[in-house]
Amino acid sequence: MLALIIAAVSGIAMAVQGSLNTALSKKVGVLFGTFIVQFTGTIFTIILLLFKLGSIKWQVLPQVPWYNYLGGIIGVGIVYGVITSIDRVGVAAATTAIIVGQVSMAALVDHFGWFGLEAVPFNIWKGVGIVLLAASAWLLLHK
């Protein structure tokens, strides 16, 4: 239950973050805004590590599969995409599309156990849920 509460709070934070990032990018440009977001996140993470709020495991880095490092690159694309979409369609519409995309991809990752994660089989109910989620998104976005 705690994990779901943390996920919900993260979702709230993502909507606020996307709005702040978009406001920033309107002043400095989308790509530079994306850079600032990534840079400030890096600085904040370094501060957390300096205060020993996380562990540093340098010795395991060579054993990590190369594709696990793509998250940072993908993160740049995500921030850029969120900024661009919120600027064009608004926070609610962009967030709705993001959620439908996230859940659809998450179902594939779960089913196939990609990236070394434990497989969670896809079933008809998950398919129905995704269809209903997409239908809900359409209703939310319909003018």
Image (cartoon, rainbow, N blue to C red):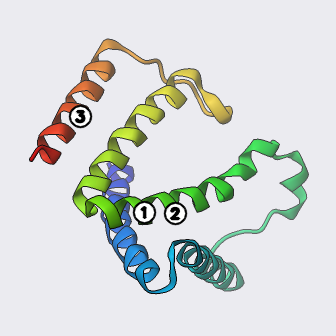
**In the depicted structure, whether residue 110 falls above or below residue 49:** above
Residue under circle 3? 133
**In the depicted structure, whether residue 54 falls above or below residue 9:** below
Q: Is residue 33 left or right of residue 60?
A: left
Residue under circle 2? 80
Q: Are marks 2 and 3 in contact (CB under 8 Å)?
A: no
| Residue at left offset 31%, top offset 13% | 124
Q: Nearer the viewer, mark 1 or mark 3?
A: 1
Let me know if residue 100 appears in the view. yes
State how far apart marks 2 and 3 are (Cα). Answer: 24 Å
State how far apart marks 2 and 1 are (Cα). Answer: 6 Å
Q: Is residue 6 left or right of residue 28?
A: left
Q: Are marks 1 and 3 in contact (CB under 8 Å)?
A: no
Q: Amino acid at mark 2?
A: Tyr
Sequence-first disc among 2 and 3: 2
**In the depicted structure, whether residue 139 falls above or below residue 118:** below
Give the image location of residue 99, x and y in percent: 34, 46
